[in-house]
Image (cartoon, rainbow, N blue to C red):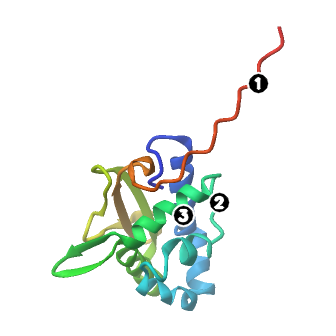
Amino acid sequence: MGMIFNTPTTLKLVQAINTAFTGRNFRDIVNNQPASFEKLQNLGPENGFYDNVWQALNIDECGVSVRLQFWWGLVDTFKQAHNGKEDYLSGWIGKAIYEAISNHGNFSGVEFFAVPGSLKNITLALPFTRFSDVNNGGKLTQVITIYTDIVDNFPGAPPRAAARPRKRGRK
């Protein structure tokens, strides 16, 4: 999510996190470990999203671990205000996920969308949108839209992994 737009890796990352928070996986979180997600209410630099959500759910990293950790670290340090309150981006996201988990009778899941954003910036579409899930009895889906620049444009971004050389066919 948010790594490089319109690439197979970004699509895999968005699919991985969306899979973790929808359908049977969302119901499993709600039924088996809601208390362990209470820390989502206080995400930020000292209580990061990557460690407390991504790794905790054992989400496949699609081979971009260092760059993904760097990007989530940015989400843990960027702040945004909404309705007179300022919080870390990860704080807004964590609270939205926690609300969906703790009010599972009203929610069927959480979906993330990564949208190209402005240079060297990450912002959220606040307030987060909720849609009625007609395939799940009208329960709500919490939608988290993140506007972000590509990782390469942020100062200190880790380099991309070297491309593997192509194998040449036999002549």
Alpha-carbon span between mark 3 and mark 1 = 31 Å
Q: CA distance from mark 2 to mark 1?
A: 26 Å
Looking at the image, residue 102 sits to the left or right of residue 8; the answer is left
Residue 56 vs 150, above or below: the answer is: below
Q: Position of residue 21 (x, y in %)?
A: 52, 69
Name of the residue lying farthest toward the right: 170
Q: Is residue 10 left or right of residue 133?
A: right
- Taking 125 as reference, is 168 left or right? right
- Residue 165 in picture, x, y percent from top left: 71, 29
- Say which residue appears at 42% left-offset and 86% top-offset: 42
Q: Which residue is labeled 3 in the image?
A: 69
Name the residue: 42% across, 79% down: 44
Between discs 3 and 1, the one toward the N terminus? 3
How many circles with numbers are drawn on the protein?
Answer: 3
Q: Position of residue 91 (x, y in %)?
A: 38, 78
Counting from the top left corner in percent of width and height, residue 136 is at 46, 69
Image quadrant in which the C terminus is located = top right
Query: For this rendering, which residue is in front, 36 or 51?
Result: 51
> In the rendered view, would you say 7 is above or below 2?
above
Badge 3: residue crowd in 10 Å (few <14, some 14–19, many ≥20): some
| Mark 2 vs 1, N-terminal side | 2
Tell me which amino acid carries mark 3.
Gln
Label 2, on which residue?
60
How crowded is the residue under tag 2: few (<14 C-alpha within 10 Å), some, or many (20+)?
some
SS at badge 1: loop
Residue designated by label 1: 167
Q: Amino acid type of disc 2?
A: Asp
Q: Earlier in the sequence, mark 2 or mark 3?
A: 2
In this view, the mark in front (2 or 3): 3
